[in-house]
Amino acid sequence: MLSLSPLYFLLLAAFVVNGRTAATGEYLKLPLLCKTPRPSPTQSLLLDMYRLSHLHRRPHHKDKQIIKSPVVSGAPSGSGQYFVELRLGSPPQSMLLVADTGSDLLWVTCSACRRKCSFLHPPATAFLARHSSSFTLHHCFHATCSLVPHPDRNRCNRTQLHSPCRYEYEYSDGSKTSGFFSKDTTTLNTSSGREAKLPNLSFGCGFRISGPSVSGASFNGAHGVMGLGRGSISFTSQLGRYFGNKFSYCLMDYTLSPPPTSYLMIGGGQNAVSKNPKMSFTPLLINPLSSTFYYIGIQSVSVNNVKLRIDPSVWSLDEMGNGGTVIDSGTTLTFLPEQAYRRILTAIERRVELPSPAELTPGFDLCVNASGGSMSKLPKLSFKLSGDSVFAPPPRNYFIETEEGVRCLAIQSVATETGFSVIGNLMQQGFFFEFDRDRSRLGFSRHGCTLR
């Protein structure tokens, strides 16, 4: 089970949710948004590889150390990310954030503007801190300030009552957000339809934001990141104590028209979310050297119920923190170790009963002519996970349509020596996933998404 720092409880101690707690069985329900038009599969591949190279190097910190909301599918640089709207401040200001299971910090673009701000900032493009009566800064000597990385010159004056906590969060490509670690009230809708005002949500108020990963056109209209990782400062960690220390989502098929709404759900009592009798479970593993990500264990892979001869060691974590498999909401395709990928590719090629298209889509090793509704002829892929559960996605989750009538295998290889495998959001579509942090397990089911 994930161990929690005492500072985590200090961070949460100030939360009061209108006098109600997780005992009510309520959870938060946030719509996930899907940006259109979506990038082409080849663009998605390039963007995924860019993101993956950053995840493998991991965020660089200079200092070592139920609410239901809709989720929107979009992505920085057009990749397969999902977005969620957060209402922050008093009165509430709406901000569109990237929902990211691959990072911890919740941060928003901030402005110190006081008057005539619409000339500087179009609506919902920056959080106007001075327009919120409940906005406050963490003091630099408060215990919560040690939870965030600081700039090199972190001047903290012990003699001043209001010396603010400064943060600097740097991503592996050099992109950076810096400003003040702050707290404010957020307003969210619960599963019962009740509006919940949550005071003292800690977040990074970013006044300096630079780099391709977090700004400009590459950020696809978002104005911050909602970190959903396992760290103590993530959005899910902060809210978990009051709504239940778990979160879940269903990523619906974005190709449908109109696309159904996907949801991010935080918390929920035992009878509120985990009542699906067809739910399967696998343990969430811990990588001591990379505490942010949600790792799972793969034991074997089968194609058409035939187990492939893949050395089990390719799935394991080594003492340096390399290897393993993570579930990631911000990556579109799935990336597997080279040895495993080659075995899977060969097995699928031998069993596919559909003709090849005239030309392969750039970046993909296997494409088929799937016109005329012939998806049923594609080989069936399944993963046996730790805990003897089986994840068996339908072919549309791993054969992506690259042009009309053409589908390509949406799996790529990754070097095990330098990184980890990733189960991307395309492979997750149509499944209900529940990240139960108290029990350190991942639940999943193809049933129940439409009932949430």
Image: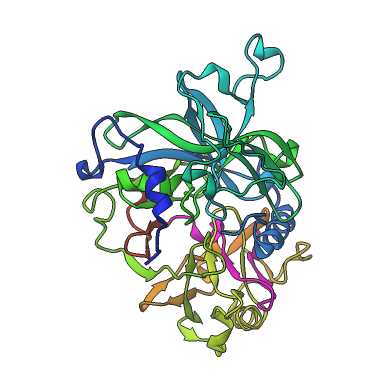
Give x and y (percent) for residue 126.
62, 26
Q: Is residue 412 magenta?
A: yes
> Residue 430's quadrant in the figure?
bottom left
Q: Residue at x 65, y 61 (%)?
A: 58
**Nearer to the camera, 20 or 48:** 20
Q: How many marks?
A: 0
Residue 248 visible in image: no
Q: Residue at x 59, y 48 (%)?
A: 81
> Residue 281's quadrant in the figure?
bottom left
Q: Is residue 372 magenta?
A: no
Instruction: Answer above or below: position of 282 versus 144.
Output: below
Q: Quadrant of the N terminus?
A: bottom left
Instruction: Answer above or below: position of 134 versus 433.
Output: above
Residue 124 visible in image: yes
Rendered image coloring scheme: rainbow
**Extent of the magenta region:** 405-430
Left or right: residue 105 versus residue 70 is: right
**Nearer to the camera, 296 or 162:** 162
Q: Quadrant of the C terminus?
A: top left
Give x and y (percent) for residue 219.
69, 40
Give x and y (percent) for residue 70.
45, 38
Left or right: residue 274 versus residue 134 is: left
Q: Residue at x 79, y 65 (%)?
A: 359
Give x and y (percent) for residue 37.
66, 39
Left or right: residue 109 versus residue 272 is: right
Q: Residue at x 36, y 79 (%)?
A: 388
**Nearer to the camera, 403 or 298:** 298
